[in-house]
Amino acid sequence: MMTSPGTPFRIESYKHDQSFHRSWDKTLQLHLSDAVLIGGNDNVRVTESDGREWRTREPAICTFGRGQWFNTIAMIRPDGIYYYCNIGSPFSFHNNLLTYIDYDLDVKVYPDMSYNILDKEEFAIHSRMMKYPDDVIRLVYRGVQEVISWIHDKRGPFHPGFVERWYERYLQYPNR
């Protein structure tokens, strides 16, 4: 289902066992194509699996590539753009709800494009506990390698000017 730019949608992530992980209440769709969904948000309510709620502290541009085993959240801070790359299943988008399975590993990217891979221990524990199939484990590791390759190649959301351009577009919507 195609919706128009400026339409709000909700993001929900789950774990491999289908248990709820986290949700972001309102992100504005900036672009939707056969290849990618790009959204923007700021001061959005996030709900954790334990019921805890908090609000994001800075504007963000979120990028979900079709068929990709990662998504990116580019956080616009006074000292530069930081990226949080969730390694997870390809997304599904229906009725203004975007969902994906979060596979624990994350890649945090700093304004100078250096990065850290986070939550390796959580991935090891969950892969045993939830019995991740070998093909899922391979796809997760491939997702990490793809993110690193994109960082080095300055592809997609890591391309200079990408986040700023989409943030300018986000600011044009009065219902943000």
Image: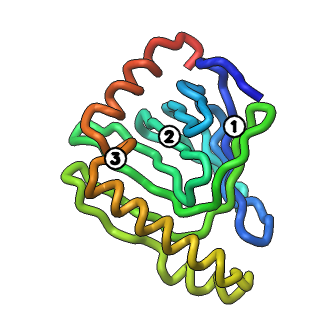
Q: Is residue 52 visible?
A: no
Give the structural element (helix, strand or loop) at label 1: strand
Q: Residue at x 54, y 10 (%)?
A: 174
Label 1 sits on what residue type? Arg
Q: Position of residue 121 (x, y in %)?
A: 50, 83
Left or right of residue 122, residue 112 in this image: left
Task: Name the residue tied to disc 1.
Answer: 10
Give the mark nearest the N terminus, 1 or 3.
1
Q: Quadrant of residue 75?
A: top left
Is the residue under label 3 in contact with that under label 1 (CB below 8 Å)? Answer: no
Q: CA distance from mark 1 to mark 3?
A: 26 Å
Nearer the observer, 176 or 1: 1
Task: Name the residue tied to disc 2.
Answer: 62
Give the mark nearest the N terminus, 2 or 1.
1
Crowding at dot 1, Cα within 10 Å, few <14 / some 14-19 / many 20+, comes out as some
Q: CA distance from mark 2 to mark 3?
A: 15 Å
Q: Residue at x 68, y 54 (%)?
A: 100
Nearer the observer, 14 or 38: 38
- The residue mark sitting in front, 1 or 3, is 3
Q: Quadrant of residue 124?
A: bottom right
Is the residue under label 1 in contact with that under label 2 (CB below 8 Å)? Answer: no
Label 3 sits on what residue type? Arg
**The C terminus - image quarter:** top right
| View extreme (bottom): residue | 128
Give the mark nearest the N terminus, 2 or 3.
2
Q: Is residue 74 above or below residue 137?
A: above
Task: Name the residue tied to disc 3.
Answer: 155
**The N terminus - image quarter:** top right
